[in-house]
Amino acid sequence: MGKRKDKLTSSIGWSTADKISVRGLDLPNEILGHMNLGDLAFLQLTGRKATPEESKVFNAIVITLVEHGITPSAIAARMTYMGAPESLQAAVAAGLCGLGTVFVGSMEGASKMLYEALPHDKLGTGVDLDALAVETVAGFRDRKAIVPGLGHPVHKPVDPRTPRLFEIAAQNGKSGEYVALMQKIQTEAEARSGKMLPINATGAIGAICCEFGFPWKIVRGFGVMARAIGLVGHILEESENPISYDIWQRVEEEILETSGPGAG
């Protein structure tokens, strides 16, 4: 616990009877009609406006994270909504709780891995990225841990989002040593494992977030922010074209068939 503050402060925002300020900008007159949602998120996080190049890359990141089909988080949100249709926020929260080290949140692990291998103060010093990749992969193999940001249960041999994300990053000045290191880690991991391990979207995003210099501990938050939008869409569809009841019934039927009375 730190020393008690004499006065509480925040540089994010404040409001009065006739004004709302966000990071020093007037919300009605300097933000509304001037920024898209991604640019506002960038402002909120960094305290400054994104450059046109940063805007393109950051918006590509968050748009990528909005939707990926009937994922565990979408199923959790839909099932919760079926049970508590009066609480949309609970359904969204249920879906967001599943964004961890396996789904969506793995970009946090990728960013942390890259920062640990290549701290900011080593950038531009001629560090041997090939050697760092060998050392990084060896460390994960010694711990019998999965290298974050690699592999995908559906997208093989290439996650179609990854090359496009890297292309947008390269076109806008956000493809440096972290992206290169992520690619070398993939090459080393595939060579050591003998398995196909494409850089998935969260691995690409983790590397690009390092190019921005975002702290690894907030990177998962981009997925939380973006996927909330997608989950609201799933809940709207669930209210109009429900599938949760059928999911529940099919699970019950198959469990009875395989594990209930008379199961073979």
Image (cartoon, rainbow, N blue to C red):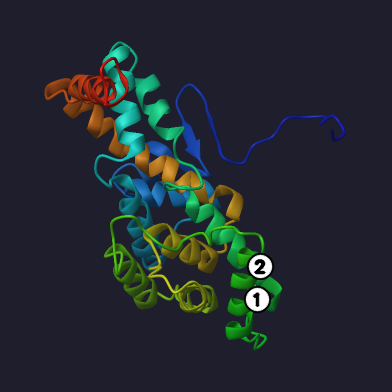
- Lateral position of residue 82 relative to residue 141, left or right: left
Q: Where 232 falls versus 50 (above or below)?
A: above
Amino acid, disc 2: Gly
- Farthest residue, direction left: 241
Residue 56 placement (x, y as % from top left):
34, 63
Q: Residue at x 39, y 52 (%)?
A: 39
Task: Using the image, determine if residue 114 lies above or below residue 17.
Answer: below
Q: What residue is pinned by disc 2?
A: 139
Asked whether 226 or 190 is in front, the reply is 190
* Residue, far right: 3
Q: Tag on residue 95?
A: none
Q: Which amino acid type is marked by label 1?
A: Glu
Quarter of the C terminus within the rendering: top left
Report crowding for label 2: few under 14, some 14 to 19, many 20 or more residues within 10 A (C-alpha).
few
Verify CB contact (< 8 Å) between mark 1 and mark 2.
yes
Q: Residue 37's quadrant in the figure?
A: top left
Which dot marks residue 135?
A: 1
Secondary structure at badge 2 equals helix
Q: What's the residue at 45%, 62% (across, down)?
A: 203
